[in-house]
Amino acid sequence: MTMISASRLPLLRPRLRGLYRLGALAAVIAMQAPIGAMAQTAGSGGSGPAEPITALYAALQQIQASSGGSTAQRAQTLAPVVDRAFDLRTVLRNSIGMRFETLSSADQDRLLQAFREYTVARYVSTFKPGAGAHFSIAPQTRAMPGGASGAIVDTKIGGSADDGTEVDYVVRSGASGYQIDDVLLNAHISQVATNRADFSATIARGGVDALIKHLNSKTQSFLNG
């Protein structure tokens, strides 16, 4: 697996932090396992709580390879993995708050489509060909605080366990198996909470159309950057 050189880590860290400033994502670790072994380290046969993160990291490794293809091709590769790994509707609903439930089904679906494209584009922008990110997943998951349903999967993105960026994934099991519904940068900065500060203010000012425009603008910025 490609490792990030010390000289490139300062370039990667701001990108990972930027995922959250713009309302997004990243990763946490306790051991450095090869991608091919990840499913066995944190879930039985790849079907346990770590399975969606394992699949996501494998796809991110693929799109950051020099042979990953054009921006459009990389987005096409990643999109179905994001659909499977994340419960995007739950992430979006929690990011908007109670207002989401007052929206029509059509408006919810329009927002979900814009949010999906935004999520994919953000990853494509962060993990460009040659980024060389190294992904690791802890061998054990953690229980949710207070006995809540779900589990926390610890991972790390970086050059080693000592200099990587820590991120916790909150996963829950549903009809589609385990899926991610929040990400915690540095173990405490919630993607959903960061999104809500951005999304709720935008939708309060201009409604659904304003938030869709906001997401589409960021999507284009990611893809053109």
Image (cartoon, helix red, strand yellow):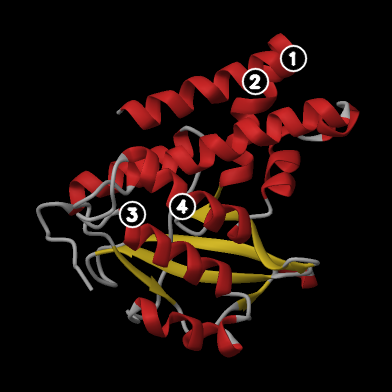
Residue at (12% x, 59% y) in the render: 6
Residue at (73% x, 33% y) in the render: 96
> Which residue has dot 3 on it?
63
Q: Amino acid at mark 4?
A: Leu
> Which residue has dot 2 on it?
211
Could you tell which of marks 3 and 4 lies nearer the N-terminus? Answer: 3
> Which residue has dot 1 on it?
207
Label annotation for residue 78: 4
Helix, strand or loop at label 2? It is: helix
Residue at (38% x, 58% y) in the render: 60
Query: Is 77 on the left-hand or right-hand side of 135?
Result: right
State if disc 1 and disc 2 touch (CB < 8 Å).
Answer: yes
Measure the C-alpha gap from mark 3 to mark 2: 28 Å
Could you tell which of marks 4 and 1 lies nearer the N-terminus? Answer: 4
Q: Amino acid at mark 3?
A: Ile
Q: Quadrant of the N terminus?
A: bottom left
- Seen in the picture, residue 24 relative to 160 is either above or below; the reply is above
Residue at (46% x, 60% y) in the render: 167
Helix, strand or loop at label 4? It is: helix
Q: Amino acid at mark 2?
A: Leu
Label annotation for residue 221: none
Could you tell which of marks 2 and 4 lies nearer the N-terminus? Answer: 4
Helix, strand or loop at label 1? It is: helix
> Crowding near pointer 2: few (<14 within 10 Å), some, many (20+)?
many
Residue toward you, 77 or 54: 77
State if disc 2 and disc 3 touch (CB < 8 Å).
Answer: no
Q: Position of residue 202 (x, y in %)?
A: 65, 18
Could you tell which of marks 1 and 3 lies nearer the N-terminus? Answer: 3
Q: Position of residue 186 (x, y in %)?
A: 44, 56
State if disc 4 and disc 3 touch (CB < 8 Å).
Answer: yes
Could you tell which of marks 3 and 2 lies nearer the N-terminus? Answer: 3
Q: Nearer the viewer, mark 3 or mark 2?
A: 3
